[in-house]
Image: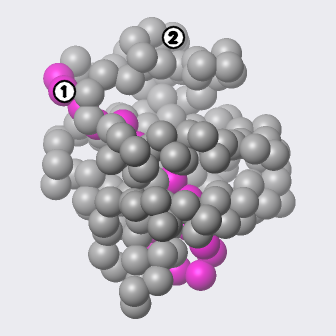
Amino acid sequence: MTIRSAVPDDFEKILEIYAYAREQMRAAGNASQWGDDKPSPETVREDIEKHQAYVILHRGEICGVFAFIIGEDPTYRVIEAGAWPNEEPYGTLHRIAGNGQVKGILAAALSFCGDKINNIRIDTHDDNKIMLHLLEKYEFLRCGYIYIEDGSRRIAFQSI
């Protein structure tokens, strides 16, 4: 697998992957994390424009997508029922999804992000059992709870 910055021509394929991911989340009992419309097309466009969207390719075809932002994430300023293990610079992994045809999407993204910065933060919904399992597998520390822009709660993790 290879990873590159997403470009405007990737937009429709990225939306397809997110639509597939929403279906899989619903089927796995996690209907509320992304609902019917997250990530929004506006968010995807903004991620591409800000050069924080990345696509994962397998045999030349896009099979995954994620956003990676180095720097402070405003939703991570306040953490409840826990604490961050450190306050050193970090990158945040957001909006990761795969097309369901290739395994290892998270592993590829983590390797890519880990080459950029040592501290990686991520959050997920209480009902996202698949992601919770993967974060445990990759030895992320469960740090507490954060609240995203719409006020909903997420479990916060960090890898150092």
Where residue 148 appears, as percent x and y from the top left, is 58, 22
Taking the image as shown, residue 152 lies to the left or right of residue 103, namely right
Q: Which residue appears at 51% of the width and 12% of the height?
A: 81
Determine if residue 45 is in view: yes
**Is residue 92 located in the magenta-colored stretch of the structure?**
yes
Q: Disc 2 marks which residue?
A: 80
**CA–CA distance in space, label 2 to label 1:** 20 Å
* Above/below status of 29 relative to 92: below
* Above/below status of 36 relative to 64: above
Which disc is residue 116 wearing? Answer: none
Between 1 and 124, which is closer to the camera in this rendering?
1
Taking the image as shown, residue 41 lies to the left or right of residue 10, namely right
Q: Where the N terminus falls, by quadrant? A: bottom left
**Element at badge 2?**
loop
Between 68 and 28, which is closer to the camera in this rendering?
68
Q: In the figure, residue 16 lies in which quadrant? A: bottom right
Q: Which residue appears at 54% of the width and 47% of the height?
A: 44
Q: Do the residues labelled 2 and 1 touch (CB within 8 Å)?
A: no
Instruction: Report the number of numbered marks.
Output: 2
Determine if residue 82 is in view: no
Q: Which residue appears at 26% of the width and 59% of the height?
A: 112
Start-end of magenta stretch:
88-106
Number of residues whose C-alpha sits closer than 10 Å to that of mark 2, classed few (under 14), some (14–19) or many (20 or more): few
Which disc is residue 89 wearing? Answer: 1
Where residue 42 appears, as percent x and y from the top left, is 60, 40
* Above/below status of 27 relative to 117: below
Number of residues whose C-alpha sits closer than 10 Å to that of mark 1, classed few (under 14), some (14–19) or many (20 or more): few
Query: Label 1 amino acid?
Result: Pro
Q: In the figure, residue 104 lies in which quadrant? A: bottom left
Query: Label 2 amino acid?
Result: Glu
Q: Which residue appears at 18% of the width and 27% of the height?
A: 89
